[in-house]
Amino acid sequence: MAKQKTGLTGRQKAAVLLISLGPDVSAQVYKHLTEEEIEKLTLEISSVKKVEPNQKEEILDQFHQIALAQDYISQGGIGYAKTVLEKALGDKEASAIINRLTSSLQVKPFDFARKADPSQILNFIQNEHPQTIALILSYLDSEQSAQILSELPQEMQADIARRIAIMDSTSPEVINEVEQILERKLSTTVTQDYTQTGGVEAVVNVLNGVDRSTERTILDSLEIQDPELAEEIKKRMFVFEDIVTLDNRAIQRVIRDVDNEDLMLSLKVASEEVKEVVFKNMSSRMSETFQEEMEYMGPVRLREVEESQTRIVSIIRRLEEVGEIVIARGGGDDIIV
């Protein structure tokens, strides 16, 4: 791994950065990493003996520059980012930053489409092959994809959702071919590695944004075509942290139905926002008891916490299915009047 001025590898820099940012921020970062990345990074952090002030300052500065460059690229591409950075830092420093980030800041395929209106994209792709539509939707923002999927014919919706879910990797050649169908080119060269896209998580993000009627139609069709896939999608449609989106009455209903031990385990690693909404919907006595018992709770296995959260999510989905609570999603049929 190449080294920069600090003499540290990229992983060592990441370790120093997380140490500098503190445990709360680092914990949030960990949520976006794979288990393998977490293991390697934790090992690296544990091997750091001391962080020199000048070293910390340089790494934080590099991180700040990377964050700025990413923001500029998202606004107007690499050319725009380079222009802004040149004005702020000078030609030499701007070029160094852009060159350093070239491999990690490549614009994703169909970047132009993510800046377009969903209805325009729909008009352009609605007569294409379902696999082509699925590929394009898997690259768009979930909100765009949700709107487009909702407006496609019902007989196509489940098929396309299934194609997104089972999509694994797509070669650069196929991506280029689809882009030619759209008669556009990317602002940067597509990486020659196979590009990961689609998958269950992608279709979950899309379905979370569609209206309830579209969601039911797609899931009902998928249950017939591929019951296992439909069940996997259902499991991911609502995660434990989403409890903050429920109204107070719904949270109180959930608290009555869940096992207290499951709730304690789930809250042990939950965000402060989740803890706040849950405790707010308990009686003062129950809230105090819960918080006291959680303070004295010893270390627990992450697997046990995840299993507890899964059981609570299952209860939430069951309560929704029988009409006891409402989970807010895209569309207008969840508006309560």
Image (tube, rainbow, N blue to C red):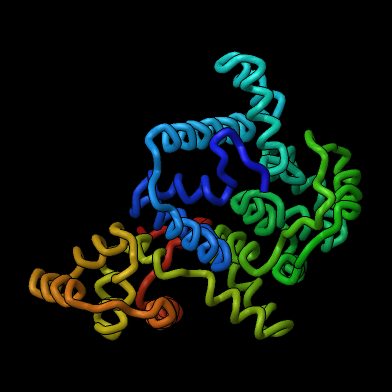
Residue 183: quadrant of the picture: top right
**Is residue 185 among the parts visible in the rendering?**
yes
Single out the residue that lies furthest toward the left: 285
x 60%, y 21%: residue: 85
**Is residue 117 among the parts visible in the rendering?**
no
x 40%, y 43%: residue: 51
Q: Position of residue 173 (x, y in %)?
A: 91, 52
> As displayed, is residue 218 above or below residue 73?
below
Left or right: residue 226 versus residue 265 is: right
Left or right: residue 11 versus residue 51 is: right
Residue 245: quadrant of the picture: bottom left
x 41%, y 76%: residue: 302
Task: Give the number of callouts.
Answer: 0
Which of the pair 44/249 is nearer the observer?
Answer: 44
Quadrant location of the C terminus in the rendered image: bottom left
Which of the pair 150/245 is nearer the observer?
Answer: 245
x 77%, y 53%: residue: 136
Q: Position of residue 99 (x, y in %)?
A: 70, 31
Q: Position of residue 322 (x, y in %)?
A: 42, 82
Q: Position of residue 192 (x, y in %)?
A: 84, 50
Which of the pair 60/113 is nearer the observer?
Answer: 60
> As displayed, is residue 17 above or below residue 24?
above
Left or right: residue 143 versus residue 239 is: right
